[in-house]
Image: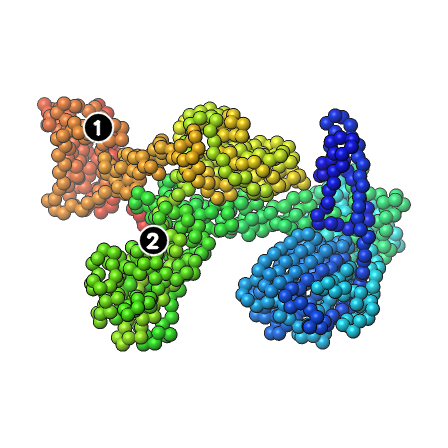
């Protein structure tokens, strides 16, 4: 809308950009004056419109030949308007040598611009560029086209929708012949391999580089060759379409043909898979006929008393938005239905005469039609009809509109209101868009994303994130930029150390040998990774550290020449730059690790390779400059010497750490906040972060516009709310938890808003969603700074910690901004309260500056999460003895091994738990013996028959208690686990078989 003046005297001017052409204008006031009155005075200024038209009949065309000396060789500009009711045809075509050409073609109501560099001669993936713009352009309305070509830069505009791009390579699309055809491809021209047909419709104001092509044609200038029947007016017959706006729409028409013949023809277009097209009842209640669209197919159903229902189907995929023709005819007892021509025809012989009633119902039924045979369980038809004929007589929809013919409800006459909701497609990450009359949906299968618009990533962003989910080592997909444009890459996550390592493999991990007496015969080795270069850059940018090992084994093969130091071997990194430094060295320094450490085999040189000895040497180097990694090529040219050889291996790209995952800030006052640039994602926006707090409420983030806004807040101890306004009024999505969020533990929040819906998820609680209005505002327009941890009014600020804050996959550096903001501190301690559960089997959680680690010292397990069993092989007569004498050095807690205190002279435990796993075939065997200074003991024994025997002596003055478990022999070579739990005089023993990895 356009705001007007605020008083009775001032004037507000608006200049519309871009300008438009119109015969009529309508002004619709949208808002009242705040003082209670509304008034409007409007003055409109414009220019006279000059129009030159040409009409093509589907067989004709124009050929324009121009003088190459008068034309600019630097730029081509095509400008025209067109309208048509045919969904296909060539608009313009220009050729060159070797199949090079530019073609603008209407295909199924869409404009396709094909720019072929000469490597392909048909629209295909092999063509240089194929662009598609527009949809449903066969609607008999004028559409504007502008094509601008400057060498390899191309701008393509259809109805103010513009696509700009630069073609790859150096070949210019201006290097073409000096003739252009319009409306078709002349037969005497060079052969064109792809199928095509001429254009049927009108052009207006057709210009090429400022030359009025239609004016030249009208004056029969020699530059123009007219082929076929071309007229200079746009006078072909106009069709009057009818739009069925709702499921209640219908059009009732009387039957006009003779009693012995039925004939109905029409064309329809729709996006809906189902809906009635035509229904009519037989005379005297003798049956009914229904022609419906079902699952995108045309289905003709006949029902007659005393006979089972009979169906015939025709066509497929008829809900593609294209016009489809239908012809229904019946004479006597023979019925025929055709869809898009005779090839799809079907016939059905009926019992008895076909005698339809007096009315045909198209698209639906009147509300008072019960008992008339008019009705469909599929609801009403929503789409468009045109060229309706009954009994070989065309139906005039204008007469229907005037009440002269038939009746109707909820129709839009003289316009097809079908809208392509998939152009532009709001489905992201190559999701497939499908649509109906009033909505669209996205198929996200095999994209790696989910959600209404395929915006939400399914995969974690790093191996570090996988580790803190408790995942073990293995192959994982990681999506380093989250909901950004890059897809997920397959990597190996090594979780065996305190930090998770990311490994990206390539195709050249084996030892490569090179031997040649000719430098030019030694090709470089090119390494291809399991991820694209953009994905690799995202992985390295996100990591704390990356490295790659290069092992170089030369024999009389140097890295640089001795006399001048010129490099003769080098490697190429991710950015396609050449590097001559080697492992352990800084960029631009031609040294190997041995040169820096001073232990090369020849002290004159900085690399073992440069010793140039007639023996095998080696340099194993670690490359660790992230901005250069990974290595894409290794080039060796010092192979001109006799007996020169070289071998080398390149390891995978290895990275550890996640700079964003632990990036955090602590907010210490309610009036403090961090500010960042405006969040400018208008159509799809997602926000994700972790928070922990003890406060009952507070705003996490806020960004404001004039009326639009977006806000995420802890509204109550157990309630997180996502609120926003995109112009349809304030909306809220709230997640409530049975447990409070202000428990000083990390909680994960992810909020998303797109043109279909808004969603909010906290931790693993069920996601909450709210659908957007079908035809409401879609763009989120913000202009203030993004406030994190507070608001612009410094009220309702957040007290606590926020980390890993990301907007549409882009991480915000909270720590950097916090260092310069009062009331906010970088970092946030205390991760064990949230991740301590990852330390299993008695392992203790230890805080780190960025994350946690597990201390397995008092556990019978090791590994990053104390999950790997510590085992040993005992030969005959062998044993391991532990002496626990300095008991006072141990702090006994619920995470410590409780039986340690059992050996104390001063402490007496009333409870202990012991667990061990074993596998043996030998008997008798002593598995475990534990004794104390008071001559108390516990022993676990395998008896000679393989049964389990447990002996407890808790009083040195009494004999031990013996427990025998003789169900079966446990000396069977299988792994068994024994758990003994005693509390006072009650002992419980559990024996179970352990499923070993790799066994069924």
Residue 143 located left or right of residue 810: right
Element type at mark 2: loop
Q: Which residue is located at x 56 percent, y 36 percent?
A: 784
Q: Position of residue 286 (x, y in %)?
A: 81, 47
Q: Is residue 667 above or below residue 348?
A: above
Foreground tag (1 vs 2): 2
Residue 777 located left or right of residue 875: right
Q: Position of residue 202 (x, y in %)?
A: 78, 60
Element type at mark 1: loop
> For mark 1, does the 10 Å Cα neighbourhood hold few (<14), some (14 to 19), or many (20 or more) residues?
few
Q: Is residue 443 above or below residue 856?
A: below
Cα distance between the residues tagged 1 and 2: 43 Å
Nearer the N terminus, badge 1 or badge 2? 2
Q: Position of residue 276 (x, y in %)?
A: 73, 47
Q: Which residue is located at x 46 percent, y 54 percent?
A: 534
In the picture, residue 664 is in which quadrant?
top left
The one of 30 and 728 positioned closer to us in this rendering: 30
| Pointer 2 residue | 624
Q: Which residue is located at x 76 percent, y 36 percent?
A: 11
The one of 169 and 59 positioned closer to us in this rendering: 169
In this orientation, does residue 660 appear? yes
What colour-coding does the image apply?
rainbow
- The quadrant of the rendering that contains the N terminus is top right
| Pointer 1 residue | 891
Q: Which residue is located at x 35 percent, y 51 percent?
A: 546
The one of 780 and 992 positioned closer to us in this rendering: 780
> For mark 2, does the 10 Å Cα neighbourhood hold few (<14), some (14 to 19), or many (20 or more) residues?
many
Q: Position of residue 49 (x, y in %)?
A: 81, 54
């Amino acid at each position: 809308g356009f705001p007007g003046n605020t008083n009775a005297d001032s004037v507000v001017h608006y200049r519309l950009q871009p300008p438009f052409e119109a015969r009529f204008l309508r002004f619709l006031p949208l808002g009242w004056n705040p003082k209670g009155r509304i008034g409007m005075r409007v003055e409109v200024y414009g220019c006279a419109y000059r129009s030159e038209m040409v009409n093509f009949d589907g067989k004709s065309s124009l050929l324009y030949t121009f003088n190459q000396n008068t034309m600019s060789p630097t730029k081509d500009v095509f400008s025209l308007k067109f309208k048509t009711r045919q969904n296909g045809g060539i608009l313009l075509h220009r050729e060159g040598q070797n199949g090079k050409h530019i073609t603008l073609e209407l295909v199924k109501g869409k404009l396709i611009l094909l720019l072929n560099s000469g490597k392909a001669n048909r629209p295909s993936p092999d063509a240089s560029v194929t662009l598609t713009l527009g949809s449903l352009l066969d609607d008999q309305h004028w559409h504007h086209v502008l094509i601008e070509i400057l060498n390899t830069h191309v701008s393509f505009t259809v109805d103010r929708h513009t696509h700009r791009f630069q073609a790859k390579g150096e070949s210019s699309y201006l290097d073409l012949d000096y003739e252009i055809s319009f409306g078709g491809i002349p037969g005497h021209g060079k052969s064109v391999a792809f199928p095509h047909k001429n254009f049927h419709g009108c052009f207006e104001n057709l210009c090429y580089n400022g030359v009025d092509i239609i004016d030249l044609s009208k004056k029969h200038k020699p530059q123009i060759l007219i082929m076929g029947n071309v007229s200079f007016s746009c006078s072909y017959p106009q069709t009057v379409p009818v739009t069925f706006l709702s499921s209640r729409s219908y059009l009732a028409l009387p039957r006009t043909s003779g009693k012995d013949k039925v004939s109905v023809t029409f064309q329809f277009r729709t996006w809906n898979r189902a809906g009635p097209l035509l229904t009519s009842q037989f005379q005297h209640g003798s049956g009914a006929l229904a022609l419906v669209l079902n699952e995108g197919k045309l289905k003709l159903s006949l029902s007659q008393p005393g006979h089972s229902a009979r169906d015939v189907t025709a066509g497929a995929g008829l809900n593609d938005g294209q016009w489809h023709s239908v012809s229904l005819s019946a004479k006597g007892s023979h019925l025929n239905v055709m869809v898009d021509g005779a090839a799809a025809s079907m016939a059905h012989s009926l019992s008895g005469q076909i005698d339809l009633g007096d009315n045909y119902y198209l698209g639906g039924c009147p509300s008072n039609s019960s008992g008339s045979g008019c009705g469909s369980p599929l609801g009403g038809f929503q789409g468009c009809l045109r060229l309706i004929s009954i009994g070989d007589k065309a139906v005039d929809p204008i007469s229907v509109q005037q009440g002269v013919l038939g009746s109707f409800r909820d129709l839009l006459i003289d316009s097809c209101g079908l809208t392509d909701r998939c152009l532009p497609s709001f489905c992201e990450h190559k999701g497939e868009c499908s649509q109906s009359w009033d909505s669209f949906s996205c198929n996200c299968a095999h994209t790696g994303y989910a959600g209404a618009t395929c915006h939400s990533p399914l995969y974690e962003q790093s191996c570090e994130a996988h580790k803190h989910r408790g995942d073990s080592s293995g192959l994982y997909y990681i999506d380093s930029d989250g909901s950004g444009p890059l897809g997920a890459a397959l990597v190996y996550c090594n979780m065996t150390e305190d930090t998770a390592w990311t490994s990206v493999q390539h195709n050249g991990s084996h030892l490569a040998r090179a031997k040649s007496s000719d430098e030019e015969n030694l090709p470089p080795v090119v390494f291809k990774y399991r991820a694209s270069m953009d994905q690799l850059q995202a992985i390295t940018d996100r990591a704390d550290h990356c490295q790659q090992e290069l092992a170089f084994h030369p024999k009389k093969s140097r890295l640089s020449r001795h006399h001048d130091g010129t490099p003769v071997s080098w490697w190429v990194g991710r950015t396609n730059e050449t590097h001559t430094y080697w492992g352990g060295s800084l960029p631009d320094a031609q040294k190997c690790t041995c040169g820096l450490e001073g232990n090369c085999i020849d002290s004159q040189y900085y690399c073992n390779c440069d010793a140039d000895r007639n023996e095998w040497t080696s340099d194993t180097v670690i490359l660790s400059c992230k901005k250069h990694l990974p290595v894409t090529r290794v080039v060796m040219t010092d192979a001109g010497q006799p007996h020169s050889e070289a071998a080398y291996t390149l390891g995978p790209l290895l990275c550890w750490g996640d700079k964003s995952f632990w990036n955090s800030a602590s907010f210490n006052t309610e009036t403090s906040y961090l500010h960042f640039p405006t969040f400018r994602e208008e159509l799809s926006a997602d926000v994700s972060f972790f928070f922990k707090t003890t406060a009952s409420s507070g705003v996490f983030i806020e960004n404001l516009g004039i009326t639009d806004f977006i806000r995420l807040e802890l509204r109550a101890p157990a309630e997180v709310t996502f609120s926003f306004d995109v112009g349809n009024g304030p909306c809220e999505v709230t997640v409530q938890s049975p447990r409070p969020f202000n428990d000083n533990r990390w909680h994960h929040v992810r909020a998303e808003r797109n043109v279909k819906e808004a969603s909010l998820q906290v931790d693993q609680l069920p996601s909450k969603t709210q659908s957007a209005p079908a035809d409401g505002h879609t763009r989120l327009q913000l202009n203030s700074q993004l406030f994190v941890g507070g608001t612009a009014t410094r009220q309702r600020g957040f007290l606590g910690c926020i980390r890993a804050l990301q907007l549409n996959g882009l991480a915000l550096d909270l720590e950097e901004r916090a260092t310069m903001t009062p009331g906010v501190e970088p970092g946030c301690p205390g991760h064990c309260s949230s991740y301590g559960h990852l330390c299993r089997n008695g392992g203790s959680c230890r805080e780190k500056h960025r994350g946690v680690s597990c201390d397995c010292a008092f556990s019978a397990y090791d590994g990053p999460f104390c999950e790997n069993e510590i085992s040993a092989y005992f030969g005959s007569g062998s044993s391991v003895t532990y002496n626990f004498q300095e008991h006072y050095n141990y702090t006994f807690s619920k995470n410590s091994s409780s039986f340690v205190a059992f050996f104390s002279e001063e402490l007496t435990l009333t409870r202990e738990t012991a667990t061990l796993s074993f596998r043996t075939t030998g008997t008798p065997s002593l598995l475990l013996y534990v004794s104390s200074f008071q001559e108390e003991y516990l022993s676990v024994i395998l008896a000679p028959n393989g049964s389990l025997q447990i002996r407890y002596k808790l009083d040195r003055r009494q004999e031990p208690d013996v427990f025998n478990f003789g169900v079966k022999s446990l000396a069977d070579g299988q792994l068994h686990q024994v758990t003994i739990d005693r509390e006072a005089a009650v002992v419980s023993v559990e024996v179970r078989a352990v499923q070993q990895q790799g066994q069924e």
